[in-house]
């Protein structure tokens, strides 16, 4: 699942190396529009619907948080 998420992130913002950041939002890798695009791609490509209550910056600020959010919303590896 992590590789797929990295591929999605690279598709959204190819100019960044997401492996170098512990906080994608604070480091300026993702803005609010990017997060919405990320959620749409996750839902489409992984077949998961992210609950509106989980759409918070802290749930998308690094790879671990994204994986936990996906799993909490029914995603599997």
Image (cartoon, helix red, strand yellow):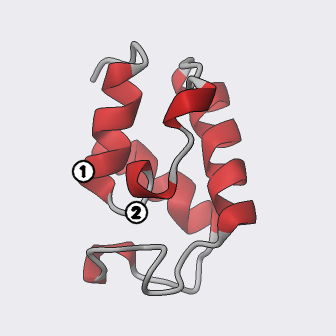
Residue 7, position as x, y percentages in the image: 48, 55
Q: Is residue 16 above or below residue 47?
A: below
Q: Is residue 29 above or below residue 10?
A: below
> How busy is the neighbourhood of tag 2: few (under 14 within 10 Å), some, or many (20 plus)?
many
Examine the rendering and report whether any part of residue 6 can be seen: yes
Quadrant containing the N terminus in the rendered view: top left
Residue 6, position as x, y percentages in the image: 41, 57
Residue 15 falls left or right of residue 60: right
Residue name at image x 67 percent, y 28 percent = 44
Which residue, as the protein is rendered here, is positioned at the far top? 74
Q: CA distance from mark 1 to mark 2?
A: 9 Å
Q: Which residue is mark 2?
A: 61
Quadrant containing the C terminus in the rendered view: top left
Disc 2 is placed on an element classified as loop
Residue 64 falls left or right of residue 56: left
Q: Quadrant of residue 35?
A: bottom right
Residue 4's mark? none
Residue 59, position as x, y percentages in the image: 41, 48
Residue 31 falls left or right of residue 60: right
Residue 13, position as x, y percentages in the image: 62, 74
Disc 1 is placed on an element classified as helix
Q: Is residue 24 above or below residue 32?
A: below
Of 56 and 60, which appears nearest the observer? Answer: 56
> How busy is the neighbourhood of tag 1: few (under 14 within 10 Å), some, or many (20 plus)?
few
Residue name at image x 44 percent, y 81 percent = 26
Examine the rendering and report whether any part of residue 1 can be seen: no
Q: Quadrant of residue 10?
A: bottom right
Residue 64's mark? 1
């Amino acid at each position: 699942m992590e590789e797929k998420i990295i591929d999605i992130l690279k598709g959204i913002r190819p100019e960044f190396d997401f492996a170098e950041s512990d906080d994608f939002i604070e480091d300026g890798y993702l803005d609010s529009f990017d997060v919405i695009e990320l959620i749409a791609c996750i839902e489409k490509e992984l077949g998961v619907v992210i609950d509106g209550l989980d759409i918070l910056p802290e749930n998308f600020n690094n790879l671990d948080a994204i994986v936990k959010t996906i799993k909490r919303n029914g995603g599997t590896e």
